[in-house]
């Protein structure tokens, strides 16, 4: 039997009837048609499916779509505004923080949530924040730099060049 | 606005980022076709069992379940078995016996993925468990059950392979002043790309055409294999299109053909509708090809003053139930014969025996060109052990035994001709960068205080760029690679390659190569790969072969275009071809720089005003067959601190000096090294697939299979030397896997270095806190 789910997705209200067991990640990808959110492990370990639910990062492979009813959802497709990349996206591009790109949306959503609550994170804070997001390509160094770039840009601080390593 | 052609050596930002950053990449599971069905797989809970019955009634009764496919259904069409890349054969679905846990037993086709999973749960299979053979050494005993009854084999031994001079090596060992021997186990590990494998098969009965969207690193080779296997069903090569869309990491795991792909094709033919199959992570970890799993005994012979003389290596390779290794056909143990490494040996001998066990098919190359990681780990561990035994500093020992600069091109004792190298320069740079001698003093100081600090070196030589067609083929397909460059009238370029990026940044790197050769801005060049209907035939991306082979093909194709462009320019400028000077982007007449034609003007003329007698158009194709492999190298130094209470190893610093010849994009190269180092850290300290005595996999999800996160991964420090390859058109060598190959030994060497004074000579990777803690406890260092 179906359940009616209302969510606001990247600022736009959407609704659909879904099975009770439908996972949020499948709701996002297959019902809403937003395929930027990826599936990597089905067990809340890899973080590729991370989205923001009421501003907090959740791994959408272990949340039911019905649990999102009446809530605010933000996915990678909501990062860029008016065609302009968000500073986090810009940082990942500038600092080569992605390779295959598969973990990138989840990684950026986690970074977005981090910078909302910690505008000037240390390297250690960044590394702990993204510890729930696995990347097999980059070795994380440039992801850390990408997030640092975004933090500086969002704070209006001059963006430092190079990495000093 | 004119954009600039940056060409080689520039950290050009990646073109491909644009779609990935916006969530607009198209990975396999992002594709939905009208009427598409979903396939899910019933898998064996046993490692070895006879199937006595499969009951499908309950599954077929579920609304939305269309079919359950079993081995005997496929057998009717001769499709129950498929060939592996190593000329073995592998079950697509078993008819009577399963040979590893999680092996595919039946496939359910349904209207959506949830219903397909319901169908899988409803299929009932009756098994009669059989004794499992888990240890490859036990598998070789005469009383071991013979696993591959289908091959009429009398043992589980697959092949014996040897290289080198056995007699001269044995003699060198008999006469040596010093010898050391060590058993080393390199465990079974898994590439675990974050995107699992999957495909969509669409059989069009009207056109008689099969289209396969597939997570593959080698689309053309797959197309040929499908045609060879299923030709009797009317699947001919010109009616098969393989498309590899965006791929979420490959690392070697997306080279083989898995039964799921074949089942999706069979299901599409059966139902007449497109069928999607996407693995979940448990299936990926439990049933996709594994890497490593080498049981090695290595020996070195040397003089008392530390001059290496001979190397002898004996290995048992666990290949699981089917020999599905990805290797050039002529090298059953891949490029393991590079195990003489960076050192000048007078003689060497290596032998490997492949063995069947009740495990998933093994022997793929996890970010490594065909077992060079195993080879490199072996020699770098052994050199360290010998240096410590002789009381010679491991850095000094290496400097004493390196192949010298004046010995290149160098022919190794096991038959490879190294193109170029400067090993001493790389090691000295790494030592300087990390402050090696200061660290040694600090270590002595700390040791006096009872602290455990270690310094480990790995000076590896890689072997990439497969490969020269005289020795390199896969199932007879020679391992050249290809590029096709088409310049349109307005000077814009579409270039297609036979390789397939899985994150390596080909769209940017290849554009830079073309920009470098032709002076056309990168922004005006679109690079396409992965569609067999459009790209020229190539062998794909693995074993760091893209730049050495396809990159070279790109340069050669561009140079062919330039030859024609010169003719057109001469016609337009009314000059002799010999009188034209090329200045990257334009020709001018010698002595008259103002009399010039840009490449864009020449392109336009090629379609509008080309010389009489010359064909119109400006395009070229090149199939590049390298004269030799390339041999990138590097020196890595790792500093570790060990917690005496917990046995935990903490990497304090890691300096990597790499030499991959001339660099096309330093940003991408550095990114490849960072990623490779993390994939070298992983097996050194974390990753391992283990089985119990019944062949049950212990840990089949990311909750148990430990991948390093940003917290465990150190801040990698990188540097470089540049020693161009003398035979590559761009002097490049390839870099994608160097760090994975070089890093594990540096880390293991650092740990052993920290513990050597306690009498510890070796600990097998992964060096977990538990293993270290046990050693410390045995030696009374900790409670």
Image (cartoon, coloured by chain):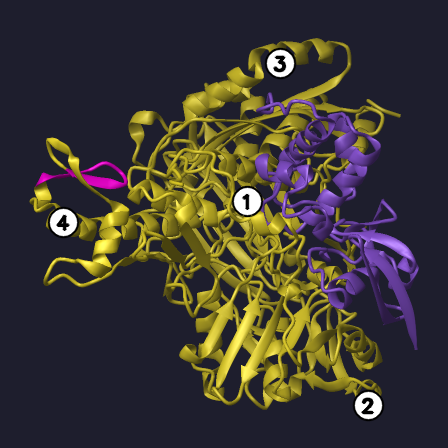
Chain colours: A purple, B yellow
Query: Residue placed at 58% from the left, 61% from the top?
Result: B355
Residue B439: mark: 3
Name the mark nearer the viewer: 3 or 2.
Answer: 2
Are discs 1 and 4 less than 8 Å apart at CB? no
Instruction: Tell me the CA gap for discs 3 and 2.
Output: 69 Å
Instruction: Provide the chain ID for the residue under circle 3.
Output: B
Seen from the viewer's position, the closer of residues A118 and B529 is: A118
Residue where numbered disc 2 is placed: B57
| Numbered disc in front, either 1 or 4 | 4
Magenta span: chief secondary structure = strand
Q: Residue at x 38, y 48 (%)?
A: B551
Give the mark, 3 or 2, whose residue is nearer the N terminus: 2
Q: Earlier in the sequence, mark 1 or mark 4?
A: 1
> Gap between marks 3 and 4, in whole Å?
66 Å
Counting from the top left corner in percent of width and height, residue B318 is at: 61, 57
Badge 1 and badge 4 both on one subunit? yes
Q: Is residue B350 visible?
A: no
Magenta segment: B579-588
The reply to whether the C-beta atoms of the residues labelled 3 and 1 are less than 8 Å apart is no
Q: Which residue is nearer to you in this view: A164 or B19?
A: B19
Q: Are marks 1 and 2 on the same chain?
A: yes
- Image depth: mark 2 or mark 4 in front: 4
Q: Earlier in the sequence, mark 1 or mark 2?
A: 2
Give the spatial CA distance, label 1 vs label 2.
48 Å
* Quarter location, residue B280: bottom right
Q: Chain of mark 2?
A: B
Read off the residue under disc 1.
B374
Disc number for residue B572: 4
Q: Is residue B686 above or below residue B89?
A: above
Q: Are marks 3 and 4 in contact (CB under 8 Å)?
A: no
Q: Secondary structure at mark 1?
A: helix
């Amino acid at each position: 039997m179906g359940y009616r789910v209302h969510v606001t997705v990247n600022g736009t209200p959407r609704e659909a009837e879904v099975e009770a067991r439908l996972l949020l990640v499948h709701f996002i990808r297959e019902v809403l048609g937003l395929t930027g959110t990826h599936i990597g492990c089905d067990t809340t370990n890899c973080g590729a499916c991370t989205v923001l639910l009421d501003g907090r990062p959740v791994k959408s492979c272990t949340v039911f779509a019905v649990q999102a009813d009446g809530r605010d959802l933000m996915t990678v497709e909501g990062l860029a505004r008016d065609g302009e990349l968000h500073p986090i996206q810009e940082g990942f591009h500038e600092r080569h923080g992605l390779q295959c790109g598969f973990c990138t949306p989840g990684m950026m959503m986690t970074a977005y949530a981090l910078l909302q609550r910690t505008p000037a994170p240390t390297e250690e804070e960044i590394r702990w924040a993204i510890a729930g997001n696995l990347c097999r390509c980059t070795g994380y160094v440039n992801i850390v730099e990408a997030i640092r770039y975004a933090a500086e840009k969002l704070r209006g601080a001059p963006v430092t060049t190079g990495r000093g390593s | 606005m004119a954009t600039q052609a940056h060409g080689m050596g520039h950290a050009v930002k990646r073109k491909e980022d644009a779609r990935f950053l916006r969530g607009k990449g198209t990975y396999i599971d992002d594709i939905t076709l009208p009427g598409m069905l979903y396939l899910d797989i019933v898998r064996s809970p046993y490692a070895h069992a006879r199937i006595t019955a499969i009951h499908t009634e309950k599954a077929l009764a579920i609304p939305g379940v269309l079919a359950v496919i079993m081995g005997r259904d496929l057998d009717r069409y001769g499709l129950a078995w498929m060939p592996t890349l190593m000329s073995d054969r592998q079950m697509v679905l078993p008819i009577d016996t399963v040979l590893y846990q999680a092996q595919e037993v039946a496939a359910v086709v349904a209207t959506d993925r949830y219903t397909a999973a319901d169908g899988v749960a409803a299929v009932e299979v009756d098994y009669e468990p059989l004794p499992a053979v888990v240890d490859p050494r036990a598998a070789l005993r005469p009383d071991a059950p013979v696993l591959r009854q289908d091959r009429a084999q009398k043992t589980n031994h697959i092949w014996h392979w040897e290289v080198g001079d056995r007699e001269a090596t044995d003699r060198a060992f008999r006469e040596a002043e010093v010898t050391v021997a060590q058993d080393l186990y390199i465990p079974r590990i898994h590439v675990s790309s974050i995107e699992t494998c999957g495909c969509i098969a669409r059989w069009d009965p009207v056109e008689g055409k099969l289209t396969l969207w597939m997570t593959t690193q080698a689309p053309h080779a797959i197309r040929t294999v499908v045609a060879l296997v299923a030709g009797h069903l009317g699947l001919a090569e010109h009616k098969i299109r393989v498309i590899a869309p965006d791929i979420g990491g490959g690392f070697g795991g997306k080279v083989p053909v898995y039964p799921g792909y074949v089942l999706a094709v069979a299901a599409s033919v059966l139902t007449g509708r497109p069928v999607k199959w996407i693995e979940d992570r448990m299936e990926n970890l439990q049933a996709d090809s594994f890497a490593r799993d080498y049981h090695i005994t290595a020996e070195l012979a040397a003089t008392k003053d530390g001059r290496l003389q001979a190397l002898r290596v004996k290995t048992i390779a666990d290949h699981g139930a089917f020999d599905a290794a990805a290797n050039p056909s002529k090298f059953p143990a891949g490029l393991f014969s590079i195990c003489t490494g960076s050192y000048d040996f007078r003689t060497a001998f290596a032998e490997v025996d492949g063995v069947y066990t009740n495990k998933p098919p093994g022997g793929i190359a996890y970010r490594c060109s065909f077992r060079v990681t195993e080879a490199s780990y072996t020699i770098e561990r052994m050199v360290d052990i010998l240096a410590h035994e002789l009381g010679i500093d491991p850095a000094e020992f290496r400097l004493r035994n390196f192949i010298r600069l004046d010995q290149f091109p160098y022919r190794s004792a096991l038959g490879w001709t190294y193109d170029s190298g400067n090993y001493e320069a790389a090691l000295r740079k790494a030592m300087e960068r990390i402050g090696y001698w200061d660290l040694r003093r600090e270590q002595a100081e700390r040791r006096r205080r009872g602290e455990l600090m270690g310094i480990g070196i790995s000076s590896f030589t890689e072997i990439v760029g497969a490969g020269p067609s005289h020795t390199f083929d896969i199932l007879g397909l020679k391992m050249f690679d290809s590029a096709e460059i088409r310049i349109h009238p307005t000077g814009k370029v579409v270039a297609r390659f036979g390789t397939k990026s899985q994150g390596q940044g080909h769209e940017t790197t290849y554009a830079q190569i073309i920009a470098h050769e032709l002076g056309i801005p990168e922004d005006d060049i679109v690079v396409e790969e992965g569609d067999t209907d459009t790209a020229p035939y190539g062998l794909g991306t693995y074993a760091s072969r893209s730049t050495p082979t396809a990159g070279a093909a790109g340069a050669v194709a561009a140079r062919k275009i330039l030859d024609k462009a010169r003719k057109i320019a001469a016609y337009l400028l009314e000059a002799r071809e010999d009188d034209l000077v090329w200045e990257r982007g334009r020709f001018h007449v010698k002595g008259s720089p103002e009399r010039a034609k840009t490449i864009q003007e020449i392109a336009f003329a090629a379609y509008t005003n080309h010389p009489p007698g010359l064909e119109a158009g400006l395009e070229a194709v090149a199939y590049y067959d390298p004269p030799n492999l390339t041999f990138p190298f590097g020196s890595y130094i790792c500093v570790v601190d060990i917690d005496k209470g917990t046995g935990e190893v903490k990497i304090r610093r890691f300096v990597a000096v790499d030499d991959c010849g001339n660099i096309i994009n330093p940003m991408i190269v550095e990114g490849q090294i960072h990623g490779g180092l993390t994939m070298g850290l992983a097996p050194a300290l974390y990753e391992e697939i283990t089985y119990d005595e019944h062949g049950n996999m212990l840990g089949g999800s990311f909750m148990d299979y430990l991948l390093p996160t940003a917290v465990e991964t150190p801040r990698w420090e990188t540097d470089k030397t540049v020693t161009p390859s003398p035979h590559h058109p761009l002097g490049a060598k390839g870099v994608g896997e160097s760090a994975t190959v070089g890093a594990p030994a540096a880390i293991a060497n650092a740990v052993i270095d920290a513990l050597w004074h306690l009498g510890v000579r070796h600990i097998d990777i992964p060096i977990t806190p538990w293993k270290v803690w046990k050693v410390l406890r045995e030696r009374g260092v900790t409670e």
